[in-house]
Image (cartoon, rainbow, N blue to C red):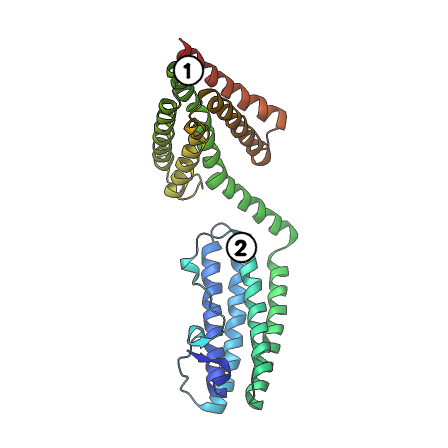
Amino acid sequence: MRDFSELSEREVLALAIGAEEEDFRIYMDLAERLREEFPASSQMFTEMAEEETEHRHKLLELYRGKFGEHIPLIRRHDVRGFLNRKPIWQLPRPSIEDVRILAESMETETKRFYRLAASRATDVSIRKLLGDLAEAEQAHEMRADAIVTKNLSADVRHGEDVHARQLFLLQYIQPGLVGLMDGSVSTLAPIFAAAFSTHSTHAAFLVGAAAALGAGISMGFAEALSDDGSLTGRGTPYVRGLVTGAMTTLGGLGHTIPFLIPHFRTAMIVAVLVVAVELGIISWVRWRFMDTSPIRATLQVALGGALVFATGILIGAG
């Protein structure tokens, strides 16, 4: 790699041309990714890509006038300290807000880099060229803001934000909550039944660990195989299954781990406290994301947990 200050005027211009082409392709990738679910934002990035094309054409005209037709292949990752962005296809599925932040940062970071590079350049022509590019990025950033205003009115932005929240609920919160509820509630009966029937913390821990892991595997497969998300919009079944399985296991292990304490009474007290915390978390999630009133969410979860807990005690004590 070479330092930016070591590049000639020709190489700097070639680097700028390549950077603008890369930004064009990033915006087109974003537009394609958003086309189905967020058409207004997709159109915004399509127009921003067209702005990058116009910017690149101006740089090409300047380059041809000074250096001819051949443009050396100089990429961002060939120059030390230059901006290097991860390809969109390597990123996990971003939220609409993540995409907007990425778009805003692209122009801002490029503008700042050009200005910093111009301040450190010793060659007058390079300094002038970098300054011109910084001003061009400033103008481009202003045009990008205009495109955002044109395509993303307050109503459209609000609608897309609501849709993004609904997708987040369907793809992560809902399967995670299902898993946490199943792991925290369904494993109560076998764990406490084993504890009260044997009065052995070791036996209770083994039963709890087996129940938690078994339930996690079962719930994960059940969620992954329930539907592929093509009609419901619930996202990738494997991710959904992984979320459900992990939260189920976590919910079951939460009140199982206290039985590692060798003293039975102490382990039982800690386990009961953990169950109360788990049920409180479930109630909070239902209130926060599922539009359930706090009192109703608490009563529903507490009632279910109490019934399963009582079942385990009755069976174990019998």
Q: Which mark is residue 98?
A: 2
Q: Which mark is residue 205?
A: none
Tell me the kind of residue under disc 1.
Phe
Give the vertical position of 164 relative to 179 (above or below).
below
Q: Secondary structure at mark 1?
A: helix
Q: Position of residue 234 (x, y in %)?
A: 44, 40
Tell me the kind of residue under disc 2.
Asp
Picture quadrant of residue 291: top right
Q: Which mark is residue 196?
A: 1
Q: Secondary structure at mark 2?
A: helix
Q: Is residue 289 left or right of residue 60?
A: right
Q: Nearer the viewer, residue 217 or 257?
A: 257
Q: How many marks?
A: 2
| Residue in the image at 41% along x and 37% along y | 246
| Residue in the image at 58% along x and 85% along y | 127
| Residue in the image at 46% along x and 36% along y | 176
| Residue in the image at 49% along x and 91% along y | 66
| Residue most extreme to the top | 318
Asked if marks 1 and 2 touch (Cβ < 8 Å), the reply is no
Label 2, residues with CA under 10 Å away: few <14, some 14-19, many ≥20: few
Which quadrant is home to the C terminus? top left
Dot placed on the residue nearer the N-terminal end, 1 or 2: 2
| Residue most extreme to the front | 263
